[in-house]
Image (cartoon, rainbow, N blue to C red):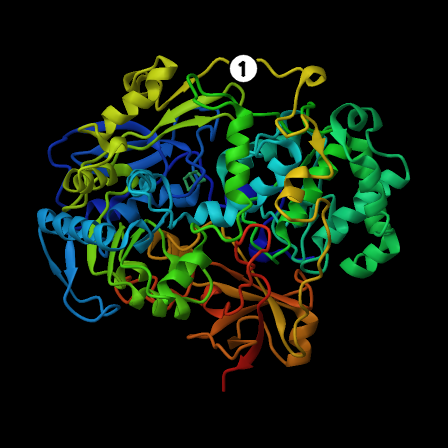
Amino acid sequence: MSVKSGFTRRSLLQAAGVAAAALPLRSLQAGAAVPGGEAWSEERLVPTVCGMCPAHCLVTAKVRDGRLESLTGTGDNPLNGARICARGMAAPDLLYDPDRLKYPMKRVGPRGSGQWQRISWAEAIDVVSLRMEQALRRHGPESLALFAAGPSALYIKELFAEFGVSRVNDSRYEHCHCNREAAYLATFGFAPGAPARLDYANTRCLVLLGSHFGENLMLPEFRRFTAAREQGARLIVADPRRSVIAAQADRHLMLKPGSDTALLLGWINYLLQRDLFDRDYIASHALGLDELREHAAAYPLERVAELTGLTPREIEQSARLLAASAPAVIIHPGRHSNWYGNDVHRLRAQAILSALLGAPGRPGGMSLVGLNEPGAEVTPYARGRQRLARALQPGSKERAEEIFRALEADQIKVLGCWGQNPFQGYPNPYRTTLAWRRAEFVFATDVLPSEACLMADIILPEATFLERSGRVELRDEVDPPLLTAGFPALQPAFEARDPYWIARQLSIRLGRGRGVQYPEASSRLEHELAPWRLRLEDLRRGQGYVALPAPPAPELDEFRFPTISGKIELVSRDLVEAGQAPLPHFHPPPEPPEGYFRLLYGRSPLHTLSSTQNNRRLMDREGENELWLNDEVADRLGLGSGERVLLENQDGLTSLRTVRLYVSRDIRADAVYLVHGFGQRSHLLGRAFHQGVSDAALMSRATANPVTGTHALRNNFVRLRKVP
Ligand code: SF4
């Protein structure tokens, strides 16, 4: 069977663009001089943290005469070794992108026109702080809203919180953490961690449900995953598409989209009915076995086969592989989880399956609670309660849907957007555009002029991760855990500024801001390191990180799970108290209308969501996305690979451009698939503008998850229109 782009088991790292050394940037060196950086001369090696994706690998920047020459993996560090991926290698093309936001600007044309006038930082800060102060005084904190994601957004989020603003949305939390925290906290009392704390070194079997390792490339975890496979760990992948990783699996279950929860309940029932679960572990550590057994009995093999489109034999064999590998089994908690609206149920079923196999707290399974920071004000139990309360709030004001509604009701006077592009990150950019127009004042902070910047009244240009201080991060997914910090390798180009500096200037004008009270970002980082009795200099000398003493592994026999009962809750009391079902249910998603296909989306190892589509080096390698289409369907429609089609969704929304077809048997006949992040509509992005097709622009249905209020994105359907 063919695999897209020729990925094979052996070539996965190379195919993903992973290299142990970066290329010299001769073309960039030959380019026009960029202001900034002149004060530092000669060659320097600066250890720092890669900010091209959330994996935050440890990298070393080689700087010569004030210009970045190369990025490489830092030594043989425990996270990414000496490796770096294609996106990390392309970081200089972000730094020297000719379309970068260079100066503070104010809008002089209609919103969306991109007509701006250069202004001073003093004026920009004055205008933003004045509008914030007026809105707070006249209308209160509910009249402000902020979309802010990534490490650079921490300080502005803290500042907004100090003013009591609750409408602060973080797309990473909403898409990746909210549902899984709800599910895992309700089951175990702790979140799985991000990255998840999984014992790859000792595992015997890995299960991935809709997780596309290698395509969604985060080197540190991928490296541990690859090592586990090389040591013989078996792999089960449940996915409607034969992804890169599914092509390598011992068992690829090409299930019907949206039927994952049925499969999980089928596995649970099979293990319970045949006494293949860890009876002693459950007796000692869990509550609710009888109710679970009764509940799961509704999912016998034949019914699950019907619901999932798999054969009873496929389900049975994979269940037996799980049982034979227990307890050294990793049921991966995944990352992006806003799929069909029943996502907390699916993740709860994953957590319960993991418990039945006896994996939590056992070698080769899931680590128990993470390292507690010294001097932490709350216990793991209290922290878990806070996080669960945050997740189990379908009407929370921090959800994107609630902010869109507040905008549509003219309740938002000041809207900020910081390092986040809701026009790609949330469904239906047409709705987002109309909502944005309702805000009285909009400011945006970013490196590049994204669609969100186009709609802003004031632009605050931000330094790239190579030009600013990074965050102090505790990396407790590796053993021993590490503390890492990013160091600026260059001075900010043009008039871009460190996000700490920007937030601090606003706080000075507004007269509040504990988080940015220190004159420099580095002073704040020193403050964060103090409980560890470390200085930034220690991390700098350690090439950007310091290994901490490994905490003693909790004794499972004496371990009290930080739930209300102190046990793993197969039947969740928290969910009952929140008015939700205490056991996971399968809710079939809506079926595609006749002639339509379910629109699935995912990642490419060459791009990070919608943030890299203006990067010269990456766009040279993957300049547009393709639509995966099943080969038998293509035959029926008279279409072939390489042909171009328009896409029209169930509500008549049509793609703005055509998309090239990739015809293959590697996807089911009821679905099509696109890489996310393309089809951007900012005409100020010379390379990204209208390249490929936006999946978000074909999502006019995004029903809210009833448990958490997050969007459900995979209930949209498209049909293909041939281009005459
Ligand atoms: S995996 Fe992410 S953090 Fe690591 S080098 Fe690649 S882009 Fe950078």
Q: Which residue is label 1 attached to? A: 551
Name the spot of residue 256 as percent of width and height, x first. Answer: 71, 60
Whether 82 is drawn above or below 160: the answer is: above
Inspect the image, locate mark 1, and give the three-letter code of the amino acid beneath it.
Answer: Pro
Q: Can residue 194 be spotted in the picture?
A: no
Residue at image location 35% in from the left, 18% down from the top: 542
Name the spot of residue 372 as percent of width and height, x first. Answer: 49, 21
Left or right: 476, with 493 as reference point: right
Point out the residue furthest to the bottom here. 724
Left or right: 89, with 382 as reference point: left
Left or right: 533, with 700 as reference point: left
Point out the residue furthest to the right here. 274
Name the spot of residue 218 as percent of width and height, x first. Answer: 49, 40
Q: Secondary structure at mark 1?
A: loop
When asked about the image quadrant of residue 525, the answer is top left
Q: Nearer the viewer, residue 513 or 475?
A: 513
Q: Nearer the viewer, residue 440 or 619?
A: 440
Residue at image location 69% in from the left, 64% down from the top: 668
Name the spot of residue 151 as percent of width and height, x first. Answer: 35, 39
Could you tell me how many numbered marks the image carries? 1
Whether 614 is drawn above or below 408: the answer is: above
